[in-house]
Structure formats: structure tokens, C-alpha cells
Image: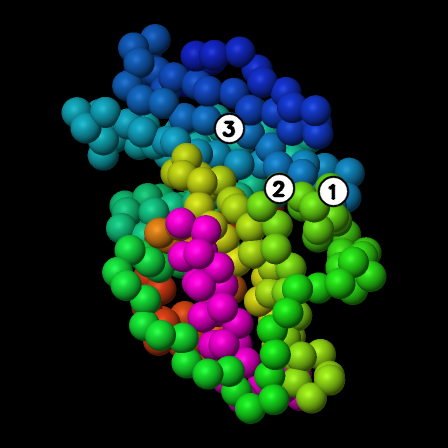
């Protein structure tokens, strides 16, 4: 039996050059599942490929259909000039994680989420001498210009829809920053999101990171939100410990693969 992909919708192209298309996974022309491929903007001349929404009917699982579907999706992305692919696997899907590993994908990050529906505890006082305030226009311009990926995600600068930029200042010296906004997750859900939270090296281990995260949660609650998500690198042990202590739980695992 031959497993192939058959387009189930038109090729969609956005103004930023990204594209996506949905496919049926077929066995001898019989539909047994679905998958979607797409691209994301990325530094350099080649886009970043994505594979999402892979589903195989229960009766056809365990027969390699998913494996062949992913390999066929990779060929589509090669044709779109992608040389790297990112996928997001639900934290509660061990079979999908095993498939990703078997096909040469490696963990690149974890998306964590915290439910904010329960009444929040009173915010603890900020560490001595620490203040959190909005970035000024000049600060935001310099901060965005210093990192091309930031500029790509903030096409209208601080005025980009949903964006909020803050700095932590201790005794007049910048101690860290916080960038919050919104993100469309691969699950299709749009959630409040911490794009960046950072503490200056000389200011670490003083509770500033915890204070910035509590501040982010308060911003979400004040805006009527009930969840907050973020992404952390697998090797960042201190950050992972901080988020776990604050009640964040795994939602998705990001995997990446280089196409040769």
C-alpha cells in the first residue's frame, strides 16, 4: 500500500511571503488522515518550515502512515526552499514525541502555560530598590533595533497590536526587561504570551525574574485574560525551575530538524 499526500485546500500565501497548505494523508487514494505544512519568517534567505495538525485515523495507526506523511511533508517544504523545520508536539502525546525523535528532530524548546482563573495571591512587594515601568519610546527603539528577530515581530514597534514593553530598574540602573503580547499557538489558540523576560547578569539571583513574571501575570489578569504562556530552552535549568515554582506546566515541546 502506498501512503501519499493529496492537497485538500488551496495554497495560501500571506503578504509577508509565508505560505501554507492542508493535505489529506491517503493510502491508495483512500483518506486516512490530515496534515498541514507552512512556513514562518526566519533570518536569512530561506523560510522556516512547519508541519502541524498531523492526524491519522485510529484504524490506520501503527502502520507507518504518520512517518510517511511527515517525510512527504518534508519534501513539500524542500520544494518551498526551506532548510529547517520546526514542529510542536503536545506534552501529553508520547507517541508523537517518539515519532519526532525517530525522524531526526531534536528538542529546541518547551512552551509552558499557567492558568490564571483562580484568584491570584496578593503580589509580593518588589525586591528592595526595584521598580518596573513602561519602556520609553527611545528605550524601545534602541532595544528593538538591537535584535533583528524582535524587529520582525514588532513591525510597528511598541505600537504593534497587543505589545507591552517594560523595564525593571534598580537604584537607577536597568536590571531587566519584559516583553508581553499575544501568540497564536500551533493548537490554534491565541494566548497572552511572554515573548521575553530577562534579568541583567549582575542583577540575577535577587528575585527580579520572579518579580517580572508576577508583574506579567497581573497585566494579564487586569486585561481579563485567564492564561499566560511562554517558551523556555531545554537547557535553561534556572528558568525552568523558576517557572515550575510559579505553577507553569508543559503544554508543547518544540522540535527542529535541518533538511540536508
Residue 207 among magenta residues: yes
Are there few (<14), some (14-19), or many (20+) residues within 10 Å of tag 2?
few
5 or 11: nearer the eye? Answer: 11
Q: Quadrant of residue 173?
A: bottom right
Percent position of residue 150, x then y: 70, 52
Task: Please provide the residue range marked out in magenta.
Answer: 201-224
Residue drawn at 46 percent across, 26 percent down: 36
Asked if residue 197 is positioned above or below residue 44 in the image, the reply reads below
Label number found at residue 89: none
Q: Is residue 178 magenta?
A: no
Q: Which dot, 3 or 1, sits closer to the camera?
A: 1
Q: Earlier in the sequence, mark 3 or mark 2?
A: 3
- For residue 37, which numbered disc appears in the image? 3
Residue 198 visible to the viewer: yes
| Viewer-side label of 3, 2 | 2
Q: Residues within 10 Å of mark 3 (few under 14, many from 20)?
A: many
**Quarter of the rendering occupied by the C terminus:** top right
Where is residue 26 drawn, in percent x and y? 35, 16
Residue beneath label 2, please?
161
Whether 59 is drawn above or below 198: the answer is above
User: Secondary structure under badge 3?
Assistant: strand
Pointers 1 and 2 in contact (CB under 8 A)?
yes
Check whether the beta carbons of the residues at disc 3 and disc 2 lie within 8 A of each other. Answer: no
Q: Quadrant of the N terminus?
A: top left
Q: Earlier in the sequence, mark 3 or mark 1?
A: 3
Is residue 75 visible from the viewing direction of this image?
A: no
Q: Which residue in the structure is indicated by mark 1?
A: 156
Q: Residue at x 57, y 15 (%)?
A: 11
Cα–Cα span, label 3 and label 1: 28 Å
Q: Which quarter of the figure has residue 45?
A: top right
Closest to the observer, 173 or 257: 173
Where residue 110 sits: x, y (%)? Answer: 44, 58
Amino acid at each position: 500500500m502506498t501512503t501519499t499526500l493529496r492537497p485538500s485546500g488551496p495554497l495560501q500565501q500571506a503578504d509577508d511571503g509565508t505560505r501554507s497548505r492542508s493535505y489529506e494523508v491517503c493510502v491508495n487514494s483512500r483518506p486516512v488522515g490530515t496534515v498541514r505544512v507552512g512556513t514562518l519568517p526566519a533570518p536569512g534567505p530561506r523560510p522556516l518550515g512547519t508541519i502541524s495538525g498531523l492526524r491519522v485515523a485510529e484504524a490506520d495507526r501503527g502502520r507507518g502512515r504518520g512517518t510517511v506523511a511527515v517525510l512527504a511533508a518534508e519534501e513539500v517544504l524542500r520544494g518551498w526552499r526551506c532548510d529547517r523545520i520546526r514542529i510542536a508536539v503536545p506534552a501529553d502525546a508520547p507517541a508523537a514525541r517518539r515519532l519526532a525523535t525517530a525522524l531526526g528532530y531534536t528538542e529546541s524548546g518547551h512552551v509552558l502555560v499557567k492558568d490564571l482563573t483562580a484568584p491570584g495571591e496578593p503580589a509580593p512587594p518588589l525586591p528592595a530598590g526595584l521598580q518596573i515601568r513602561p519602556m520609553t519610546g527611545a528605550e524601545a527603539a534602541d532595544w528593538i533595533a538591537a535584535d533583528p528577530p524582535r524587529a520582525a515581530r514588532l513591525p510597528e514597534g511598541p505600537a504593534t497590536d497587543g505589545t507591552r514593553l517594560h523595564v525593571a530598574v534598580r537604584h537607577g540602573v536597568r536590571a531587566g526587561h519584559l516583553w508581553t503580547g499575544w501568540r497564536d499557538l500551533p493548537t490554534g489558540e491565541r494566548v497572552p504570551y511572554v515573548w521575553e523576560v530577562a534579568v541583567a547578569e549582575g542583577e540575577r539571583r535577587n528575585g527580579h525574574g520572579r518579580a517580572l513574571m508576577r508583574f506579567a501575570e497581573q497585566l494579564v489578569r487586569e486585561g481579563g485574560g485567564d492564561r499566560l504562556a511562554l517558551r523556555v530552552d531545554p537547557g535553561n535549568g534556572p528558568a525552568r525551575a523558576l517557572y515550575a515554582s510559579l505553577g507553569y506546566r508543559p503544554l508543547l515541546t518544540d522540535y527542529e530538524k535541518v533538511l540536508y
